[in-house]
Amino acid sequence: MHICARSMRSTKNRRTIDQFFKDISMLDIQLLRSQPEVVAAGLARRGAAIDLAPFEALEAQRKQVQTQTQDLQSRRNTLSKQIGMLKAKGEDIAPLMAEVAGLGDAQKANEDKLAVLLAELDAFAAQIPNMPHESVPEGTDASGNVEVLRWGVPPSFDFTPKDHVELGEGLGGLDFAAGVKIAASRFTLMKGEVARLHRALAQFMLDVHTAEHGYTEVYVPYLVNPDSMFGTGQLPKFEDDLFRVERGDGTHLYLIPTAEVPVTNIVRGEILDTASLPLKFVCHTPCFRSEAGSYGKDTRGMIRQHQFDKFVMVQIVAPEMSWDALEELTGHAEAILQKLALPYRKMALCAGDMGFSAAKTYDLEVWLPAQNTYREISSCSNFEAFQARRMQARCRDKGGKPRPLHTLNGSGLAVGRTLVAVLENYQRADGSVTVPDVLLPYMGGIITLTPLR
RNA sequence: GGAGGCGUGGCAGAGUGGUUGAAUGCACCGGUCUUGAAAACCGGCAACGUCGCAAGGCGUUCGUGAGUUCGAAUCUCACCGCCUCCGCCA
């Protein structure tokens, strides 16, 4: 079982108490202590059980050892100060020196013991997912998700619609074999008009979010350090899904699986003025996912790739604002689909189907004619204080105490899957594809993607 | 990659082993004064953890980690970051 890297890094148990607590409590450690039954109930809704007995036993020990350690420390500090004073006056310090000499070993032993206890508590707390919001539907898997709304009408074709693989290859714009040759399976090469359509989608999304939705465009590193991955909750539990890059000096970085990681970590360790909130960032990046364990799923086409482009919208808000912000942010993702006239439905994920860090999640699913079904194209979540606590990201009102802020993010949208949706929904019987109206300004006069020959 | 310099509270900036969690200034908050504001004056103002009903106590933190010491912002070592100069490079 993993514990945080900052815990692992230190081989000797001389870390301060404070530093240990920085590592834990994605969940509010106070909640776990004071109302463990609330935590257990929340976990049960996610279909997970928790055994609180070990935690309570550890916690009792921690309390006793920590108090004792601090008392010893206090005693030593007092004596040391006295030594200083006596020495300054030129008096005899031998008796005090004798007393303080015995303190060292006892204290060291206590500190070591405490460090072990705190590491165990850390590991325990770090595994507990966020508590689902009360409005989250009950359910243990995707079948429990609730459709909130359906927008648009799936197109009806008087021919059998092709899937995006057939369409893209016919257009000479998608080359899956080249992706495999150059890299590996689940990598794709785009070219010509299809590549341009992909770029047009990205530019269109960026323009809408910055000009109409009030987001600030950011450009971020695509490789991030482990601390950032911990901050947003990818680590310690989901390292297998990440591409890891070793460095010559023995450290390592990770390729981002979503821009959520670098963008949300902008506020890691910061105390922001509440009046300066909300912060709204939009960011377009490639995303890299190793997706260990997904072999055999969606192997055809561009639906599930190791590399794909995606927009993320991130909002950093005052705690009391986050539920309104979730509705707003989801609406921003919906606006893109609406402008593209792509039929979609909005799903409220049930407790058992939500991600580790989320308090509530809406998925947007776009209609894919060839699959005759809706497929996920955006996921919008409110994490409440879960990520913020992990990242020590706080806000402060005038004259007030710092408190964890709330973070949200949503895809707006996954560009590759949007491309798939456009190809399939805008196709015509001859294999050509009409360019959606809103993309025309970005297509340099191309109004139809035409098949080769 | 080579040489040198530097990392202290929201900011600026003192502090080189002992009642220093840290001078001073700015910013900020409260008050006096003023018709109001400004100025002036007075007072307050770090974070985190922990114990406590509370008042408050205790602990930790001066880039990070490891050492020396009864005691470290201050001494030693390693690492990280930033700045300057040289070299190289998209």
Image (cartoon, helix red, strand yellow):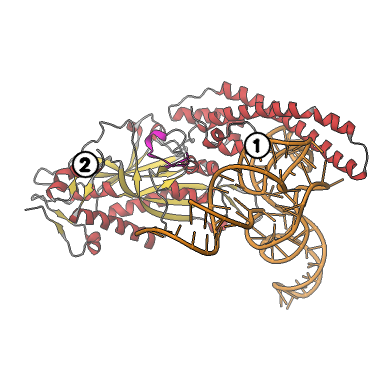
**Other-residue count near label 2 (Cα within 10 Å), few / some / many at <14 / 14–19 / ≥20:** few
Looking at the rendered structure, the kind of residue marked 2 is: Lys
Residue A95 coordinates in the image, percent (x, y): 89, 31
Residue A391 located left or right of residue A107: left
Residue A447 coordinates in the image, percent (x, y): 16, 61
Q: Which residue has dot 1 on it?
A: A16
Residue at 22 percent of width and 54 percent of height:
A195
Q: Chain of mark 1?
A: A
Residue A190 located left or right of residue A9: left
Residue A445 in which image quadrant:
bottom left
Q: Who comes first in sequence, dot 1 or dot 2?
A: 1
The Cα atoms of the two marked residues, 1 and 2, are separated by 51 Å
Q: Is residue A223 at all visible to an observer of this figure?
A: yes
Give the residues drawn in magenta, as a range: A239-253
Q: On screen, A90 above or below B81?
A: above
Residue A306 in which image quadrant:
top left
